[in-house]
Image (cartoon, coloured by chain):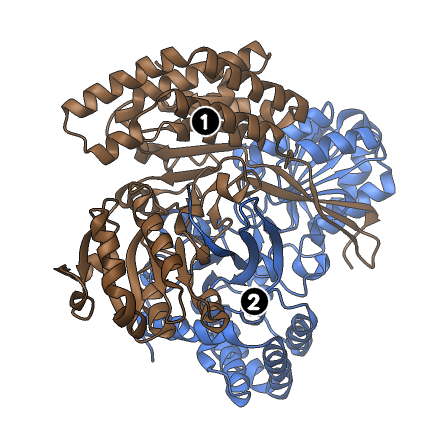
Chain colours: A blue, B brown
Amino acid sequence: MKTLLESAAAAKAASAAVAQLTTEQKNAALLAMAGALEAQCAGVLAANRADMERERAKGMSEDMLDRLMLNEKRVADMALGLRQVAELPDPVGEVLADWTRPNGLRIKKVRVPMGVIGIIYEARPNVTVDAASLAFKAGSAILLRGSASAYESNAALVEVMRGALEGCGITPDAVCLVEERGHDVVDKLLTLREYVDLIVPRGSARLINNAVEKATVPILQTGTGNCHVYIDGSADYAMAEAITINAKTQRTSVCNCAETLIMQADWAEKHGEALLKALADKNVELHGDEAAAKYAEMIPATESDWADEYLRLAMAVKIVPGVEAAVEHINRYGTKHTECIVAESAEAAGYFLNNVDAAVVDWNASTRFTDGFEFGFGAELGISTQKLHARGPMGLEEITSYKYLVIGSGQVRP
Amino acid sequence: MKTLLESAAAAKAASAAVAQLTTEQKNAALLAMAGALEAQCAGVLAANRADMERERAKGMSEDMLDRLMLNEKRVADMALGLRQVAELPDPVGEVLADWTRPNGLRIKKVRVPMGVIGIIYEARPNVTVDAASLAFKAGSAILLRGSASAYESNAALVEVMRGALEGCGITPDAVCLVEERGHDVVDKLLTLREYVDLIVPRGSARLINNAVEKATVPILQTGTGNCHVYIDGSADYAMAEAITINAKTQRTSVCNCAETLIMQADWAEKHGEALLKALADKNVELHGDEAAAKYAEMIPATESDWADEYLRLAMAVKIVPGVEAAVEHINRYGTKHTECIVAESAEAAGYFLNNVDAAVVDWNASTRFTDGFEFGFGAELGISTQKLHARGPMGLEEITSYKYLVIGSGQVRP
């Protein structure tokens, strides 16, 4: 078993080699990983069953068990993701800009790999493959630190990928699992500036806040998603119901599901009862303000109902006079992830799109589309909720850096 | 006098208004600031004299006094910078990408302001105007925390800019000086996540490391520049001398000046003596390894000579067998700022450009060109030495964010 420092040093050493691989070498390795994953699916599922049984016995909730669970379909989706990443254009070496200064200096801005990317994440084991494939295609080595609850699943997935790399003559340390266990490993990883160029914390608010507090390595905050659906006065009822039900119930344990429903008062007067009944029929527990409680039975909402993620079949409900008040509420309580307006009025939608401060703002579309696959990125390393570097789904380009090449003929500065 | 929290809240409140300004409104205000700066130059210089006299009495070095000093030329340069920023294209609202998914969702990626940008910086008061003008043009409010040694100069410059903003009917809180004094103000600022979207620490290694250690607000590390000039075996002597002398001596107190000279062994055998004499003639104190000491009198170099910035007329000198060893040394000791190769050989230059890990890599050009003005950005908020978000000189685009607008017709996720 490697210590954290040994794993980090191995990833750092591998990063120089990964940066030099050609597009063809990287794509062949990604396809080899996909094939290996399918061929060794039974072994991966066996490892996952060990995780599932241990965690079920320890009392993990059904929602969380759903995140942890692998089956043939989910492993096949991982292999599909690997093949999609192989098909994506290689971001490394892209010339982003190229200009010549009056003094004759030619300046080229070219995309380069990040180096070593660390990722700290929770239950879902598909993150292991998504993250490794994206980092690898983007020319970086990756250091994976999943949760203890998914350790066997993650270790099995990493072993399959490392085997495929070796089969292609590439150093397996391009994909490194943090094998060291223990309470303080995450905090140590967050300060390994000598070895790690970027850390992506991905999981609960607690995990992310811990990273924000303690990291000295640059981080990309990902997603707690306290996402809102605002139903404007101009909204079509059928569309409003379809989007609200989809955003809340299609999958409840993910960051891009909706947590709060905001209805314009006149619209609520006409349709509030029907919409809230549709939610209740889907077993959604309602928490609302006084005005909302006119249309359905609900638990009175407290401050935490507006501020926190439920990540289960529960929804806060608020009534507002119009789009301005909706935007004000969202900018106060939202987590800058994904916010949705349902409206026929282009004016209301325009105000919402311009003034809501979030990574993704939807007009007449479910919040559930905030996702690297759905955006066409092939996979994603997470959904960024910070404003620096990358916002929203992070695909290949979002995990690269760039450098300037300045080409002269002896110029000096006067 | 405002407390830090009052200043931060004022900047936050102003940021929403600044984000809504049209390009014309922003440009008119920038030109008004430039005019006001020229009209009120005498007052600014008087405030600067107070800073200069106090700091000279306290024993500030001549190099540092040069960084603090303002004169009519430097104030005129600030006004010029403001006018250049007014002429630059407005980055806000730019559509960075626009595509439609197979399910009909249209996704638009648009550039948006950062919000509130904080900057923590040292002596040079021109940073006050450069930073404020760039943040303002980029649609953000700015919170300025200069050093105590430049407080009067900075306060005078901010007052001039705030007056010009008010004259244009714009909230003066778009440009806020941190007025609260005291030891812990910087540390408090570094954790104001509720108010500040980005902090740029700009100054000494100590200032920057403190920010890296303590910030919970996302930061852009700027530049300690331990920059190298590598003279390849294929280099032309006259060019090598001109670039080395310029990179080391044209201005010594800035981050983009060179600190270490690396010569290829055969080239040094032919030209080392002449080049080192040229440096000595410019009063450059030499620190070198044994091989370099053959060509001139010098102090034996220690580990810190390779690792630290002199920021004065001193230079470390190293002899290497070739470009690979030069790159190895640079990637070990460099600070990822600016690195230069002087070479006629395209092969050696190509290896250097590809393998050196730095924000800017120069081929046959002085390191002193790493600068927002010299790159054509109009001004700069600093030179980033991290790989996340922005690398090298940070102009307008580098201090913006983006968001995705997703426009549908009722799509839900299957």
- Residue at 39% from the left image edge and 74% from the top image edge: A13
Mark 2 and 1 residues: CB-CB less than 8 Å, in contact? no
| Residue at numbered disc 1 | B77
The amino acid type of the residue labelled 2 equals Ala
Hey, which quadrant is residue B352 in on the image?
bottom left
Q: Chain of mark 2?
A: A
Q: Which quadrant, please, contains the C terminus of chain A? A: top left
| Residue A209 visible to the viewer | yes
The amino acid type of the residue labelled 1 equals Asp
Q: SS of the residue at dot 2? A: loop
Q: SS of the residue at dot 1? A: helix
Hey, which quadrant is residue B48 in on the image?
top left
Number of residues whose C-alpha sits closer than 10 Å to that of mark 2, classed few (under 14), some (14–19) or many (20 or more): many
| Residue at numbered disc 2 | A138
- Residue at 20% from the left image edge and 52% from the top image edge: B280
Q: CA distance from mark 2 to mark 1?
A: 41 Å
| Residue B2 visible to the viewer | no
B84 in relation to B298, above or below = above
Q: Chain of mark 1?
A: B
Q: How many marks?
A: 2
The location of residue A166, given as percent across then percent down, is 50, 87
